[in-house]
Image (spheres, rainbow, N blue to C red):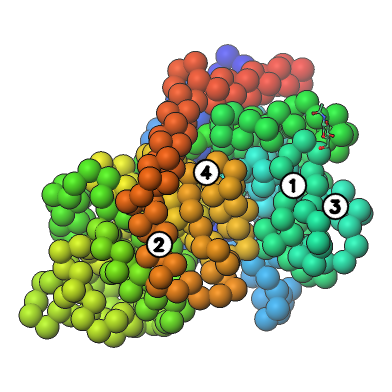
């Protein structure tokens, strides 16, 4: 059977944010490595999801298998947190996942299982069917280290992590500031904390861990995984840094809005535009939105701003500044904002083609909520950042980008704790777009870009890591037969 195409099943947990990275990985394995890929999707029945599936899941070697949606309403209440919900959904879906795999008869059954970071409970199914099993984590190695070390921290540390006065130590890795712990670690009495510790343990029980990072970006952490004896007492797994895996550009269509936007970008000077976006789920408070608008305006730098109304006043329209006499500024922005900034910037409502924007030569900065996929897209294009974490999940990213890699600036106080005022915003924007310090940051991020592109080229570290992974798979499959 080894002569045949390697057949890989990848299991995605519910939610678009989890589905996209899995599809990107699947595409890579199918296109560049000639594998047959079946993606098992826990559908949550959103129309956006179907669209993404259509866009990213095409190709002769990719199959999608939908796991029927599960009803978990009797298992949760108003206090059940996001991560706990995902874990419960996955748990309830296990019988369906099992029968999906059991239903694929000999010769059609996948050879191995790759689970995304929330689905490792399905490892038992892989074991039952004698399939090697791996976990794919689409975030950083540092995040993986924290998660996998959490069972130890759980024993070592008393009280809430966020109340600790000393940073949390992970052997060989950079320590973690108590205020930077990921969301499920914020409250140790919550179910989602217990789920996190369980998952941390389960990661170690697989045959390896694929991570969406690369050797140069997180050398210290990756080396600790391989060489630090104290860490290896806890985490024996092999890690494969295979990133950056990022989204392909949006399919080009006759979309008038994008067309206008890209034409506007074409006319701007090189590296002069700040792109501002808080991701698909991110909204700011009404007060913060006003401060941000003023901050952008007084900085006098060019911008494209994906604005989401603070409440539900979205009408889905797109407006270019200065497109009328009464300037059309929506009422949640400072009065006359569009008129005053008409030569500086564009406002986009709801959605913008981020991949195209970040790779455009006129773009010179990115104000971001620092989700990992946005972060990688920015690094890959050599665009320096202003990092603005909205959720606990993103703080570690922000710290890594600003303090460790030196490719970003950040507000002095976490934006979740205090409104960032216009003066500070102006300063950050000017720092990134028009200062000596900004030049250094830009040089640094361009080095990171080069190292990212090197990693994913033939002979690069991530391509080699992917090959090592596939070799490991072959060895395990040979042992099995
Ligand atoms: C492993 O980590 C510990 C704690 O951070 C450190 O003291 C030790 O030197 C490291 N060992 C190696 C081999 O790097
Ligand atoms: C980065 O942000 C993502 C959310 O987009 C989160 O899932 C991940 O845990 C964060 N990574 C780190 C290293 O904090």
Q: Residue furthest front?
A: 436
Q: Which of 357 and 40 is in front in this view?
A: 357
Contact, mark 3 vs mark 2 (Cβ under 8 Å): no
Residue 169 is left or right of residue 94, and the answer is right
- Real-space Cα separation, disc 1 to disc 4, in angstroms: 17 Å
Q: Mark 3 points at which residue?
A: 153
Single out the mark in the foreground, 3 or 1: 1
- Real-space Cα separation, disc 2 to disc 4, in angstroms: 17 Å
| Ligand 2 within 8 Å of the CB at mark 4 | no
Q: Is residue 448 in sight in this rendering?
A: yes
Question: Crowding near pointer 3: few (<14 within 10 Å), some, many (20+)?
Answer: some
Q: Name the residue under label 1.
A: 175
Q: Name the residue under label 4.
A: 406
| Figure check: 436 above or below 237 | below
Q: Mark 2 points at which residue?
A: 427
- Real-space Cα separation, disc 3 to disc 1, in angstroms: 12 Å
Single out the mark in the foreground, 2 or 4: 2
Question: Crowding near pointer 4: few (<14 within 10 Å), some, many (20+)?
Answer: some
Q: Residue 146: x percent and y percent? A: 74, 48
Single out the mark in the foreground, 1 or 4: 4
Contact, mark 3 vs mark 1 (Cβ under 8 Å): no
Residue 400 is left or right of residue 196, and the answer is left
Residue 297 is left or right of residue 47, and the answer is left
């Amino acid at each position: 059977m080894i002569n045949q195409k390697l057949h890989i099943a990848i299991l995605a947990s519910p939610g678009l944010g989890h589905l996209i990275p899995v599809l990107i990985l699947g595409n890579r394995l199918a296109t560049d490595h000639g594998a047959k890929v079946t993606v098992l999707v826990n559908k949550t029945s959103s129309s956006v999801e179907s669209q993404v599936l259509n866009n990213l899941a095409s190709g002769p070697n990719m199959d999608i298998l939908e796991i029927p949606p599960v009803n978990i309403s009797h298992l949760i209440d108003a206090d059940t947190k996001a991560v706990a919900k995902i874990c419960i959904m996955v748990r309830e879906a296990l019988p369906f996942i099992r029968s999906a795999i059991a239903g694929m008869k000999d010769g059609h059954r996948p050879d191995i299982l790759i689970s995304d970071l929330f689905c490792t409970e399905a490892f038992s199914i892989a074991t039952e069917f004698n399939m090697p099993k791996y976990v794919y984590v689409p975030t950083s190695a540092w995040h993986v280290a924290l998660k996998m070390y959490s069972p130890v921290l759980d024993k070592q540390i008393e009280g809430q992590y966020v109340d600790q006065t000393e940073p949390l130590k992970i052997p060989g890795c950079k320590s973690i500031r108590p205020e930077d712990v990921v969301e499920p670690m914020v409250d140790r009495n919550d179910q989602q904390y217990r789920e996190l510790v369980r998952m941390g343990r389960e990661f170690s029980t697989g045959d390896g861990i694929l991570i969406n990072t690369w050797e140069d970006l997180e050398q210290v952490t990756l080396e600790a995984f391989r060489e630090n004896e104290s860490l290896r007492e806890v985490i024996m797994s092999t890690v494969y840094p295979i990133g950056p895996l990022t989204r392909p550009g949006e399919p080009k269509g006759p979309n008038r809005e994008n067309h206008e936007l890209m034409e506007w970008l074409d006319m701007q000077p090189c590296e002069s535009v700040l792109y501002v976006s808080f991701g698909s789920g991110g909204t700011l408070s009404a007060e913060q939105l006003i401060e941000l608008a003023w901050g952008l305006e007084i900085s006098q730098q060019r911008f494209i701003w994906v604005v989401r109304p603070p409440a539900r006043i979205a009408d889905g329209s797109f407006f270019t500044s200065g497109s009328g006499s009464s300037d059309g500024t929506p009422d949640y922005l400072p009065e006359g904002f569009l008129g005053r900034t008409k030569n500086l910037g564009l406002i986009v409502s709801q959605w913008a083609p981020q991949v195209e924007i970040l790779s455009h030569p006129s773009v010179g900065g990115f104000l971001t909520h620092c989700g990992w996929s946005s972060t990688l897209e920015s690094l890959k294009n050599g665009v320096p950042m202003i990092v603005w974490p909205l959720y606990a999940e993103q703080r570690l990213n922000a710290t890594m980008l600003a303090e460790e890699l030196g490719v970003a600036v950040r507000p002095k106080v976490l934006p979740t704790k205090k409104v960032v005022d216009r003066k500070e915003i102006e300063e950050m924007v000017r720092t990134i777009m028009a200062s000596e310090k900004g030049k250094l940051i830009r040089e640094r991020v361009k080095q990171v870009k080069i190292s990212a592109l090197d990693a994913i080229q033939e002979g690069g570290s991530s391509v080699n890591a992917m090959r090592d992974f596939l070799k490991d798979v072959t060895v395990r499959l040979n042992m099995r037969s």
